[in-house]
Image: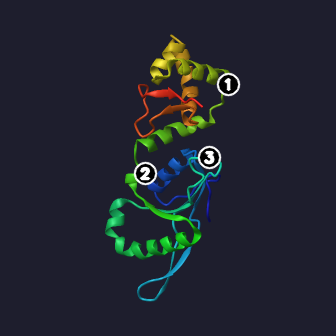
Amino acid sequence: MPTSNNESQQFESTLERDLMYILKFDFQVDKFVAQPVTINYIDKLGNPRTYTPDLIIYYRKDLAESKGKKPVLCEVKYKDDLCQNFREYHPKFRAAIRYAKAKDWIFKVYTEEHIRSPYLTNAKFLLPYLDVKTDEGMLSSILLRLEDMRETDPQTLIASMFSDKWNQAMLLPFLWYLIAVRSIGTNLMQPLTMTSRIWHKYE
């Protein structure tokens, strides 16, 4: 049964699960659905076959960055599996390409090279902070201090606001929340640490 990112997720591999972490963290993604369609096709011997891709990804239309992105029908495979079993997968993928084109979608195969990166590590770390109970006063204070500093790192920023370790630790969840919601800029393609470069995102 198809599931969306608003429901309990089903996944067939840890690699597929990791892609779901990335999609949940991607603010451009509106929703994604597991096992969204079953595609009928005829194999080279004339036999009827079916193929069910892993996911379909829908992008938000209210953002300039994503409003032109087409839905992506996708399969998640380990690279070794893909190479070893390409003859088996090729007719399935070819059928999916035709199906997606008819729907004005895109079909894509994701491997660990696309998924398992510092971005995934950052997404898994930051996702829980999206549920942090926010304190508007604290968030504003962090943003105002960062606006003055323009660019710094988490360690230097919190040290500039509090000298004692307890209050610095208290600030961190709010700082990670601001990074998670993209109110503070950083390079999420690199490991996120206390010495990562962060900057104020001017409107």
- In the image, residue 158 sits, relative to residue 196, either above or below, namely above
Residue 151: x and y, percent? 47, 23
Q: Nearer the viewer, mark 2 or mark 3?
A: 3
First of labels 2, 3 by sequence position: 3
Q: Which quadrant of the figure has residue 82?
A: bottom left
Q: In the image, what residue type sits under mark 1?
A: Glu
Check disc 3 and report its element: helix, strand or loop: loop
Pointers 2 and 3 in contact (CB under 8 A)?
A: no
First of labels 2, 1 by sequence position: 2
Residue labelled with disc 3? 63
- In the image, residue 68 sits, relative to residue 92, either above or below, namely above
Quarter of the figure that contains the N terminus? bottom right
Real-space Cα separation, disc 1 to disc 3, in angstroms: 24 Å
The residue that appears at 32% across and 66% down in the rendered structure is 83
Residue 95: x and y, percent? 48, 75
Quarter of the figure that contains the C terminus? top right
Please tell me which residue lies in front, 190 or 171: 190
Real-space Cα separation, disc 2 to disc 3, in angstroms: 24 Å
Please tell me which residue lies in front, 5 or 144: 144
Residue labelled with disc 2? 115
Q: Nearer the viewer, mark 1 or mark 3?
A: 3
